[in-house]
């Protein structure tokens, strides 16, 4: 158990990407670089690949970089 809440909590899941805030903690669920697999298709899992979170450590502002088209573009946070 954590005695002090962190500023940022990062988790990983191979299918999704997300940015949220909970009780003052920035939550990042980082994405995969792999596209949809047959296994995911069979289970109706729609992955969100090729996303990276760029965090300003002074303000904890987040920009989401979308690499799905090759060169990165700034995507809507959480997208």
Image (cartoon, rainbow, N blue to C red):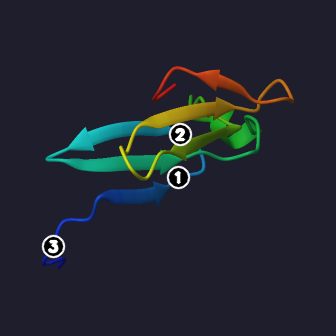
Q: Residue 70 carries which label?
A: none
Q: Image quadrant for the N terminus? A: bottom left
Q: Which residue lies furthest to the top in this view?
A: 76
Quarter where residue 3 is shown: bottom left
Query: As displayed, is residue 7 above or below residue 4?
Result: above
- Real-space Cα separation, disc 2 to disc 3, in angstroms: 27 Å
Quarter where residue 21 is shown: top left
Q: Is mark 2 on a helix, strand or loop?
A: loop
Q: Do the residues labelled 1 and 2 touch (CB within 8 Å)?
A: yes
Q: In this figure, which residue is indicated by the disc labeled 2?
A: 16
Nearest the viewer among 77 and 12 is 77
Q: In this figure, which residue is indicated by the disc labeled 3?
A: 4
Question: Where is residue 77 shown, x and y percent of the image?
Answer: 47, 27
Question: Where is residue 35 shown, x and y percent of the image?
Answer: 76, 36
Crowding at mark 3 (Cα within 10 Å: few <14, some 14-19, many 20+): few
Question: Where is residue 66 shown, x and y percent of the image?
Answer: 68, 29
Q: Residue placed at 32% from the left, 38% from the top?
A: 20
Q: In this figure, which residue is indicated by the disc labeled 1?
A: 13
Query: As displayed, is residue 79 above or below residue 9?
Result: above
Question: Where is residue 51 shown, x and y percent of the image?
Answer: 64, 37
Q: Earlier in the sequence, mark 1 or mark 3?
A: 3
Q: Are marks 2 and 3 in contact (CB under 8 Å)?
A: no
């Amino acid at each position: 158990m954590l005695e002090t809440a962190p500023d940022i909590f990062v988790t990983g899941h191979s299918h999704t990407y997300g940015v949220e805030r909970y009780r003052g903690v920035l939550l990042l669920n980082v994405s995969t670089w792999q596209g949809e697999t047959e296994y995911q298709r069979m289970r109706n899992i729609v992955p969100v690949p090729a996303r990276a979170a760029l965090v300003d450590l002074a303000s904890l502002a987040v920009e989401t970089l979308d690499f799905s088209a090759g060169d990165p573009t700034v995507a809507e946070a959480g997208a």
